[in-house]
Each structure stands twice: as C-alpha cells, then as structure tokens.
Image: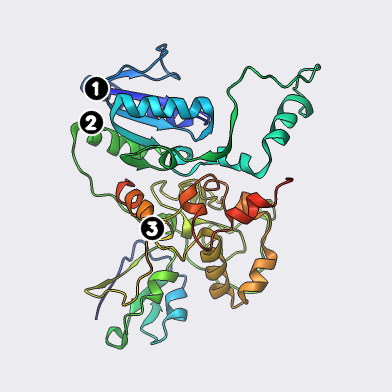
Amino acid sequence: MKIAIEELAGCSGCTIAVLDLHEMLLDVIEAADIVYSPVIMDVKEPPGDIDIAFVTGAVRNEENHERLKKIRRCSKTLVALGTCACYGGISGLSMLSSNEDLFRYIYQEVETAKPDGVIPTDVPPFLYRAFAVGDLAKIDYYITGCPPKEAFLREIIPAMIAGDTLELSRKSVCSECDRFMGPVENWSLKHRHEGVPDREHCLLGQGYLCLGSVTFGRCGAACPKNNIPCHGCNGPSLDILREPCRDIYNMMVRRISDLTDKPAKEVEKELYDVAHTMYAFTIGSLIMEDKETSKIRDLVKERGR
Amino acid sequence: MDIRVDKDACVGCGLCVKDCPMHVYELQDNVSVPVRPNDCMGCLSCHEICPAQALEHRGIYPARRHYIDIKVCEMLRKVI
C-alpha cells in the first residue's frame, strides 16, 4: 500500500494535521508507505503506482493544475483533504481581487516587498479564478476541515488503509455544540471583537455571527466550546450542499430572522462583509457558486474590475 | 407519525416550535419534544430550520423535490 500527499495552493496545514496523528503514525506507516509528500519528505515527483493519494489545497495557478492532473494519473484513489481542496478554502478569497491587483499588492505594496518592486515573470501564471480540486479532476472522496481534525483523521485514515467502512455523524456543528438557546431579546448583530460572549448560551442568539448551523460537523464544535463563533471552516453542512435552494447566506438570514422575529430584509441590513464572514471557505467552489441563491457571483463581480 | 429527536444534537433553540404550522413541538427542559406527532402533515419545514439536524421523520418523503445537480449528487456521495 502506497500513500502520497500532494500540495497545491494551501498552507500545508492538512499535511501537518496528518502528522498530528503522533504515535498512531507508526501504525499507519507499518500498514502503508508514504512515498511522496513535499512537506514531510524529499521526493520531487510522485511515483506512478500510488494506492491512495491525498491532495491538499486549491487550484490557483497553472502549476497547481498540472500537479493535480499528474497525481490523478498516478493514483488509484484520490482524496481531497481539507476545505481548500473540497471547496476552494481561503485561497478562493483571492477571487475578490483581480490578478493584477493581487500581484501589485504582493510584490509592490506590502512592507516586505523588495525595494525594486519588480513583478516576477518566471513564476507559474495564475488561472482566471480559484478552483476546488473536484471542479477539475475526478475525486473519489472528500474530507473537509481546515485542517481536518486529528481526532477524526485517527478514525478515517486507518479505516481507509484497511478498506473498512465507518459510521460517522453527518450533521452540522450545532449538533456537536453544548450550548443552549438563551433568551433572544433586542437582538442586534455584534462584531467578533465586541464584548465577551456568555459561555452557556447560543452564540447566534447572543448576536454573534456563528455559522455552526450551516457548517458540516467533525470538529467537536471546538470554536464555540472555546467562546469563539464558528466561522465555517469545515465547509457547508450536507443539507446546504444537497438542496439547490439552500445556501450559507440565505439559511443564516432565515434562521436569524426566525429567531429574532426581525424581517429578513432588516437582518440583511445588519450583516457586514459577507464574503469574509459567510463565504470565507467556500468562495472558490463552483458547486457552491452554481446555487441559484448563492451570493458568490455578486461578490466576485463587485471587485475592482 | 413517527418523529424522532436526537436529544444530544438538539440545542433547544425552539425554531421548530415556532416554525411548525401544526404546533407539533414543545420545548421541555431545553429539548424539543414532538408532543402532537399525529397532527404532523409532513411538510418537513422543521427539518429545514433545525440548525443541528436533530429531527427525523420515519417513513415520509417530501412530495415536491427540487432537481439536484448531478455534480452535487456525485460530491454528496463521496463526503466522508
């Protein structure tokens, strides 16, 4: 059994999440060889006979696309690991600026840019948009999470190597959260830095934009349990993914509106920076963009040019 | 009507109580309880609003279903 982990446009956090298996990694490498992973070993190209390849990161430039095609050719089973691979992830937010703006900012405007301000031409050219890997290649399995949590990988990776099946919860983050709904009075939307949330009651009910209800579980509601509103890093919950008329934005507005008895239009007026607060992890996904009610198309259109 | 509530998943938000046109649910000790399951007309609006996907209706199916894109179906089957 040969395993590979390929890196595309991402932060390598998903590969580090695999290393977070700690001692269990010894059992994994007893059952399977890791033959290619640019982050953890010095092998330049994937060999041709990989059994399970994990691909992390989105596709943002031509090199990413070539690498994706190559790893698909070299592997029997290709698994999208992490939210960037599944839904475009953080890399997708680059679509809010034009390629020219991105390059100008990175090579000329940030403090750490070289003083000569030359935009290099010997780097792989950018594609016109970000893609989730499933938009460009046949994917056999999707494992979401930014990064996928090690408690979950501990169950899934050994099972995958052994060819076993597992029964896992397919519910939202709320189902794993230990908070209860408190009184919802004089509701108004709070920014994350405003006040300290009460630990017992639902963050959405307290006015914080917690995406738990529209986000796929598997994280044990780690953020809400530590008093931080969910920002949706696991990608959309499966009901949102499945139903064409449901989207992250419209279901959040509907739930807030039902909870607070405010008309949906009033709720929408209070929302701020929808691209970063609601679609931060899914903006690069064609599947999420193609939904009739999706706001992604408008958000991308609003960019400079 | 056989309605099951996953008590561990339910967050006690009361949205199903508010949303149900037939007043099937009541909140008891911060958990939704289907107190009048026989009144249920199977519209499944409670499924749509439940943030924790805690509700299950056995043996009924929505009468009208939107077309689901083949790409979405394929991805849905493969999410683990």
Q: Which residue lies under the disc numbered 1?
A: A32
Q: Are marks 2 and 3 on the same chain?
A: no
What residue is rendered at 44% in x and 18% in y?
A38
Q: Give how far across and how far down residue A99 sits, in percent.
A: 67, 35
Per the model, the C-alpha gap separating discs 3 and 1 is 36 Å
Q: Give how far across and how far down residue B68 sits, in percent.
A: 37, 61
What residue is rendered at 43% in x and 65% in y?
B11
**Comparing labels 3 and 1, the label whose residue is closer to the camera:** 3
Q: Give how far across and how far down residue B19 sits, in percent.
A: 45, 79
Q: Give how far across and how far down residue A186 sits, in percent.
A: 66, 73
What residue is rendered at 48% in x and 39% in y?
A84
Q: Residues within 10 Å of mark 3 (few under 14, many from 20)?
A: some
The label on residue A126 is: none
Q: In the rendered structure, the residue with mark 1 lies on which chain? A: A
Q: Quadrant of the N terminus of chain B?
A: bottom left
Q: In the rendered structure, the residue with mark 2 lies on which chain? A: A
Q: Quadrant of the C terminus of chain B?
A: top left
* Disc 1 + disc 2, Cβ < 8 Å: yes
Q: In the rendered structure, the residue with mark 3 lies on which chain? A: B
Front one among A87 and A150: A87
Q: Which residue lies under the disc numbered 2?
A: A161
Per the model, the C-alpha gap separating discs 1 and 2 is 7 Å
Mark 3: which amino acid? Asp
Q: Is residue A162 above or below residue B80?
A: above
Question: Would you identify the image quadrant in which residue A124 lies?
Answer: top right
Q: Which residue lies under the disc numbered 3?
A: B69
Per the model, the C-alpha gap separating discs 2 and 3 is 31 Å
Residue A216 visible? The answer is: yes
The local secondary structure at tag 1 comes to loop
Q: Is residue A106 above or below residue A256?
A: above
